Image: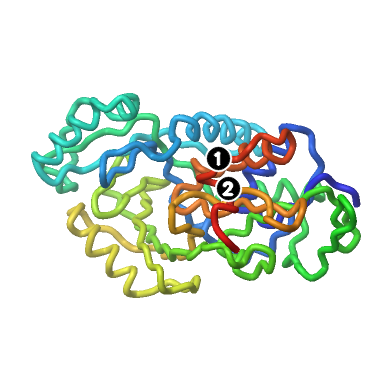
Amino acid sequence: MNVDYIIVGSGLAGISFCEQLVTHNKRFVVFDNSSQQSSLVAGGVYNPVVLKRFTPVWKCDEQLPLAMRQYARLEVALGVKLDYKIPVYRKFASLEEQNNWFTASDNPGLSAYLSTSIEKNTNQHILAPYGYGKVLHSGRIDVKTLVNAYKKHLLDQGMIVEKAFDYDQLITEDATLKYQDIVAKHIVFAEGFGFKKNKFFEKLPISGTKGEHLTIHSPELKLNGILKSGVFLIPIENDHYIVGATYNREDKTHEVTEAAKQSLLKKLDTLITCPYKVVDQSAGIRPTVKDRRPLVGEHYRLKNHFILNGLGSRGVMIGPYAADKLFQYIENNVPLDKEIDCNRFDY
């Protein structure tokens, strides 16, 4: 088999790069053994504002349009609903937070994303006496549906190998790469935290942060937006809600924990008053980098070996942006910004 690219990983990073290749008529094959779960358990919220500090998300003006175009294309190509354009509401804990919101909304970098009106709380089951601030141009991508539908699409096209990639079998010959019966021009590693087994890039500083979230069923809640307080409360379907997420830098397993569950429930109980039932709990390891920027680029020594990783907790927005930058670098020699170039670190 002769292809332009081998891609290792089919989470948000891998899918975003695949879409670059589809758009530009490149041939590719994907390897994925379903060992990484961070994309499958992601809440999928896209939100251009850092709500803890009322500051714009890094490069949000560039990221958001790219992401929206990608997910719109994928909805058509895959025949599934992915993009739920529902507002994000930031619960205010005090009058001071209200004032801080108004001050932030005057910031030229935020004025397009923050409503200048205080939203009154009209839901009797939510504790929010100071109301909310409303974030504009926000919503949720159904990441689980995306990942599963995309993998099925690749299977139907014969473009995915559902096996672990064996790094020792990758052979470089002149300007080409050989892996078993596949000959390729380039390889892109988009494995998430699974990159720790990648002998080419394993020394890059991806620490990994475990996140857990709950799914609850609460027929009385009737929440019509994504609510951010101590946790995110995200409506999905049939009176179900995602409650998340935790951040644990020590535990690198995919096992759910009682401690995380109780932590989330404690915060949830300060937010809502109606009955609910926990129906599911999920965990995954987010690929996080110490400077909170993705890792994109070519290996410092090995030609045609590339990485697309470190998307952290904002993968639905950063993924399409980072994939576009990597593609332009490989195919058109467009230099990478130093703040995302993987070679900003010694490895």
Q: In which quarter of the image is the C terminus?
A: bottom right
**Rendered location of residue 345, percent (x, y):** 55, 57
Q: Position of residue 39 (x, y in %)?
A: 53, 55
| Residue 282 in which image quadrant | bottom left
> Circle 1 is placed at which residue position?
337
**Colour pattern:** rainbow
346 and 77: which is toward the camera: 346
Left or right for 156, reference 278 = right
The location of residue 46, given as percent across then percent down, is 43, 40
Q: In what element is the residue under mark 1?
A: loop
Spatial separation of the CA atoms under disc 1 and disc 2: 6 Å
The answer to whether marks 1 and 2 mark residues whose Cβ atoms lie closer than 8 Å is: yes
Characterize the local packing of mark 2: few (<14), some (14-19) or many (20 or more) Cα atoms within 10 angstroms: many
Taking the image as drawn, is residue 191 in sight? yes
Dot 2: element = loop
Q: How crowded is mark 1: few (under 14 residues within 10 Å), some or many (20 or more)?
A: few
Kind of residue indicated by mark 1:
Asp
Residue 235, percent across and down? 37, 45
Residue 269 is left or right of residue 204, and the answer is left
Q: In this view, does 39 lie to the left or right of 100?
A: right
Q: In the image, is residue 206 above or below residue 23?
A: below
Q: Nearer the viewer, residue 237 or 109?
A: 109
Provide the residue designation for mark 2.
341
Kind of residue at disc 2 = Asp
